[in-house]
Amino acid sequence: MDSLGYQKTFWNTFYYQQVINTNKNIEQIMIDGGKAYIKTLTSYISISLFIFLPFFALFLKLVYIRRNYTYMEHLIFVFHVQTVFFLLFLLFYLLNLITKTDAFLVVFFILFLLYLYKALRFFYKQSRLKTILKFIILNSFYLFLATFGFIVVAIFSFVTA
């Protein structure tokens, strides 16, 4: 950094190291076609889903504000639904390995969305119309949260890989 004319402060050293890591990652992507990056990215996705669950539970608390559920009850519900998501995903991932087809992905999403609707209806005990409306609102928010999380994870895995 001396040759570049920068002082050796903490932040300058940090930024310099990030540039070096980014250049290494770009070279690695050129060499292996991005396989190492994809591997790092997928390892962080499940962690990011776990980190964003409390925010989703808080959003559930706001959507079902008239219900007498505590934040912890919403959080347990979210953990339960996420567990079913991962179990279904594991099942369909194994089916995909056996059959070598991606046709099961559509079935996976349909089954999970049906399960989520039924879980919301059973847990919160509201009418079909209210459940459908809140289902749409919740999925829209979760899609926004997942997109934001994916962008953060993509940047983080590119810088740290």
Image (spheres, rainbow, N blue to C red):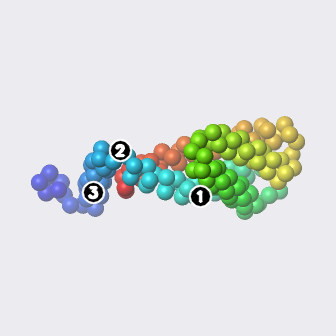
Between 114 and 158, the one lying in front of the other is 114
- Residue labelled with disc 3: 17
Q: Distance between the residues labelled 1 and 3?
A: 29 Å
Q: Where is residue 59 in the image (x, y as percent from the top left)?
A: 68, 49
Asked whether residue 67 is in view, the answer is no
Residue drawn at 73 percent across, 45 percent down: 111
Amino acid carrying mark 3 in the image = Gln
Q: In the structure shown, which secondary structural element does the residue marked by tag 2 occupy?
A: loop
Q: In the structure shown, which secondary structural element does the residue marked by tag 1 occupy?
A: helix
- Of tags 2 and 1, which is closer to the observer? 2
Amino acid carrying mark 1 in the image = Phe
Contact check, label 2 and label 3, Cβ < 8 Å: no
Residue drawn at 58 percent across, 54 percent down: 49
- Residue labelled with disc 2: 33
Between 33 and 157, the one lying in front of the other is 33
- Residue labelled with disc 1: 50
Q: Which of marks 2 and 1 is nearer the N terminus?
A: 2
Quick one: quadrant of the C terminus? Answer: bottom left
Task: Residue lying at the far left in this picture: please name it.
Answer: 3
Q: Tell me if mark 3 has few (under 14), some (14-19) or many (20+) residues whose alpha carbon lies within 10 angstroms of its own.
A: few
Quick one: quadrant of the N terminus? Answer: bottom left
Amino acid carrying mark 2 in the image = Gly
Left or right for 42, reference 90: left
Residue drawn at 84 percent across, 37 percent down: 129
Q: Which of marks 2 and 3 is nearer the N terminus?
A: 3
- Of tags 2 and 3, which is closer to the observer? 2
Q: Distance between the residues labelled 2 and 1?
A: 29 Å
